[in-house]
């Protein structure tokens, strides 16, 4: 991410410049304290006292200015209220319009004040974390508890924006009363379901929500998509960004995500039966399922590059390819051809437009709803993952139309082909290609993303300079939610901030902590793919489950995704640090794998179901926390362009799925009796390796 100090300077309102937190001074102070302690000049007690006093002074400066501005706004709203009262006695349409504009202007100024509070709250949090990591103990806990719980707390003014809520309420109430309510002058308290049409009210509510952290769950869920979110608040003026937004296009984008996940998992319960009906071994289901992932390794790259120029055309291409792929998959039965079956699945993988889905949300959805759109992307994926096997369980018919067979093996292909045909028509009619900013040379902004530095300061990525060496590199602060090279950011030339132009360059930008996060992502996707893809073979061998039973099992597992994320995002993430949740989840995944092994005693349904649930749920928790950390430690050069962080994580997960499915097929040659243990063994080794790498990396960095 771009250095916070630089972004703070760029986002400051000029007339308020002297009242912001002096982040740069405090960062220098932290480095100075560390040098003094190492040299033996200062003791820790004196450092704590001096730093606490400096923080108190900074907070007092912010709070006194905040109270002054609240008073100015309160006086202004009082006068507007008196004006409104007089107009109720003698209504005047022109003056009512002026009054509305005056309230909107007050709302805009309140937004500036909310952004002022938010920027300073972020700065305080960051400098406290920086101090903790530099000195190795929890000064933050001590400072916040002693200051926040005091009856004269000034810290509460910053973190809880005491008093601002009343101003938000006053402007919202009065603007609401001035809305056209069909001649009624009812209060918003009398008719709370009525929507407030004025956009300034929504903007104020959004800004206030960010300060109160009322969207913790949405934020946690959105991070699964690995779509970079702005940490600093957006500018007040968002009209230009809103012009690029089209709700129906976003809905189509999410529908593509949902259908693709359904398409991926709808064949899992029946792939083994389909393989045996074509004369192959049941374990060839691994290759059948994995063929889609093999093609996705390549399609992710060209779709990511294509989305630099268009979103509509790649989505059209994706739909056509998936339509053809599903028809081939369904017709392989009557043609008695395993090759056509595999080619059909490869075609489906070549239509994977998840890179386009991510880029559309990142580039075309306004910042104020981007988090909700990202959460929608993850929810659509989770819902598709659950609905795929469930739909397969319902498709248990067996009939013929002319020479085409429709049974439990072929119906998934025919149903998905029909779904993609309907989607294609809907897409052609309703999708609106976003307006792209045209530069002086006539090329689009996106097409030049890989060749020129972006002008937007917030989108310029923090980058590790490849050829720069300095003494500061020995003092890098690996804070969990900012780039470790923040101190060097302002000195870097623009050329080093361009989006990367190749996977090799992207790999060179990966720090040890990012590589560990990608290894964890690889591990959890590998373990989940082994569990899901071999479920039909394992349950048929040990428990004689039919297709419906396997579909119900997979459906129930898929349904756990959203409830688990609600619990983690709303509660657990507020009680523990993310790195603690990360390590605990890895250990639980390992426990689930160990419990899944068939040793000496008889293998039972409870053992399989419980161990599978532990493994899957832990992996889901791990995925959310892992991607949350990954989005913070990854260079912002990887936040846009073709070779972005989303592409890297997709490739890591897809390669893991390919290897897992290949392992299932290869292990099948050893017989069904050994299949379970042989496929679980690599999962266990990779999981233990990721745990060791996590402990080693974070101990060395922190």
Image (tube, helix red, strand yellow):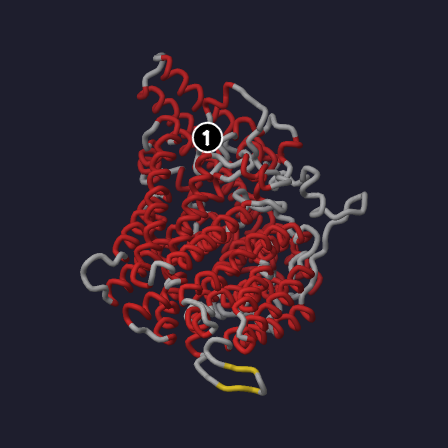
Q: Residue furthest left?
A: 601
In this rendered view, identify the residue nearer to me: 498 or 157: 498
Percent coordinates x, y for residue 208 in the rendering: 49, 51
Q: In the image, is residue 312 above or below residue 237?
A: below
Q: In the image, is residue 542 above or below residue 60?
A: below
Neighbor class of circle 1 (other Cα within 10 Å; few <14, some 14-19, many 20+) is: some
Percent coordinates x, y for residue 152 in the rendering: 35, 38
Percent coordinates x, y for residue 387 in the rendering: 45, 70
In this rendered view, identify the residue nearer to me: 461 or 16: 461
Judged left or right of residue 663, residue 502 is right
Secondary structure beneath dot 1 equals helix
Judged left or right of residue 335, residue 672 is left
Please tell me which residue is depicted at 54% across the width and 38% down the height of the picture.
507
In this rendered view, identify the residue nearer to me: 505 or 328: 328
Q: Residue furthest right?
A: 441
Q: In the image, is residue 208 above or below residue 512?
A: below
Q: From where the camera sits, is residue 80 visible? A: no
| Quarter of the view holding residue 382 | bottom left
Q: Which residue is mark 1?
A: 58
Judged left or right of residue 355, residue 217 is left
In this rendered view, identify the residue nearer to me: 545 or 30: 545
Judged left or right of residue 251, residue 215 is left
Q: Quadrant of the N terminus?
A: top right
Please tell me which residue is depicted at 37% across the width and 60% down the height of the picture.
531
Please tell me which residue is depicted at 45% across the width and 52% down the height of the picture.
659
Q: From where the camera sits, is residue 100 visible? A: yes
């Amino acid at each position: 991410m771009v250095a916070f100090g630089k972004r703070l300077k760029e986002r400051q309102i000029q007339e308020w410049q002297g009242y912001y937190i002096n982040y740069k001074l405090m960062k220098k102070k932290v480095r100075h304290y560390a040098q003094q302690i190492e040299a033996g000049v200062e003791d820790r007690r004196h450092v704590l006292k001096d730093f606490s006093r400096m923080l108190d002074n900074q907070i007092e400066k912010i709070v006194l200015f905040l109270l002054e501005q609240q008073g100015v706004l309160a006086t202004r709203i009082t006068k507007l209220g008196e004006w409104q009262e007089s107009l109720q006695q003698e209504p005047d349409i022109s003056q009512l319009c002026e009054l509305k504009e005056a309230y909107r202007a007050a709302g805009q100024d309140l937004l500036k004040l909310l952004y002022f509070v938010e920027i300073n709250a972020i700065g305080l949090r960051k400098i406290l974390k920086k101090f903790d990591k530099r000195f190795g103990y929890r000064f933050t806990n001590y400072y916040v508890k002693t200051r926040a719980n005091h009856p004269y707390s000034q810290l509460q003014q910053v973190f809880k924006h005491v008093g601002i809520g009343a101003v938000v309420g006053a402007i919202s109430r009065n603007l609401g009363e001035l809305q056209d309510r069909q001649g009624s002058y009812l209060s918003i308290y009398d008719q709370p379901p009525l929507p407030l049409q004025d956009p300034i009210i929504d903007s104020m509510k959004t800004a206030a929500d960010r300060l109160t952290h009322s969207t913790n769950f949405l934020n946690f869920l959105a991070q699964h998509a690995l779509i970079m979110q702005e940490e600093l608040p957006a500018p007040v003026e968002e009209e230009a960004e809103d012009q690029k937004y089209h709700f129906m296009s976003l809905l189509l984008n999410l529908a593509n995500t949902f259908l693709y996940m359904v398409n991926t998992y709808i064949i899992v319960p029946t792939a083994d039966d389909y393989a045996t009906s074509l004369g192959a071994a049941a374990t060839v289901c691994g290759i059948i399922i994995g063929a889609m992932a093999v093609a996705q390794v390549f399609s992710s790259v060209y779709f990511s590059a294509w989305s630099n120029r268009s979103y509509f055309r790649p989505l059209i291409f994706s739909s056509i390819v998936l339509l053809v792929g599903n028809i081939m998959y369904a017709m392989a039965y009557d043609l008695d051809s395993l090759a056509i079956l595999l080619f059909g699945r490869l075609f489906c993988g070549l239509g994977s437009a998840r890179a386009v889905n991510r880029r559309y949300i990142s580039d075309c959805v306004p910042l104020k709803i981007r988090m909700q759109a990202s959460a929608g992307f993850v929810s659509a994926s989770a819902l598709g993952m659950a609905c795929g096997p469930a739909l397969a369980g319902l498709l248990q018919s067996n009939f013929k139309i002319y020479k085409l067979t429709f049974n439990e093996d072929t119906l998934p292909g025919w149903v998905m082909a029909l779904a993609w045909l309907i989607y294609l028509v809907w897409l052609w009619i309703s999708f609106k290609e976003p307006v792209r900013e045209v530069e002086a040379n006539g090329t689009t902004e996106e097409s030049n993303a890989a060749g020129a530095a972006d002008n937007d300061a917030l989108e310029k990525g923090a980058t590790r300079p490849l050829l720069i060496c300095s003494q500061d590199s020995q003092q890098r602060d690996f804070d969990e939610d900012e780039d470790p090279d923040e101190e060097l950011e302002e000195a870097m030339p623009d050329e080093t901030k361009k989006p990367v132009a190749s996977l090799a360059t992207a790999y060179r930008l990966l720090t040890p902590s990012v590589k560990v996060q990608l290894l964890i992502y690889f591990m959890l996707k590998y373990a989940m793919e082994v569990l899901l893809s071999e479920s039909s073979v394992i349950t048929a061998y040990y428990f004689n489950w039919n297709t419906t039973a396997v579909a119900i099992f997979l459906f129930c597992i898929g349904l756990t995704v959203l409830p688990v994320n609600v619990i983690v995002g709303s509660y657990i993430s507020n009680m523990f640090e993310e790195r603690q949740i990360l390590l605990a989840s890895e250990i639980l995944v390992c426990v689930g794998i160990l419990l899944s092994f068939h040793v000496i005693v008889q293998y039972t349904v409870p053992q399989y179901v419980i161990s599978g649930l532990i493994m899957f749920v832990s992996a889901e928790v791990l995925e959310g926390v892992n991607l949350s950390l990954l989005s913070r430690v990854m260079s912002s050069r990887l936040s846009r362009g073709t070779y972005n962080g989303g592409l890297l994580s997709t490739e890591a997960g897809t390669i893991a799925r390919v290897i897992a499915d290949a392992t299932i097929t290869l292990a099948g040659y050893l017989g069904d009796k050994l299949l379970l243990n042989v496929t679980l063994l690599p999962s266990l080794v990779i999981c233990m390796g990721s745990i060791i790498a996590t402990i080693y990396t974070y101990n060395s960095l922190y």
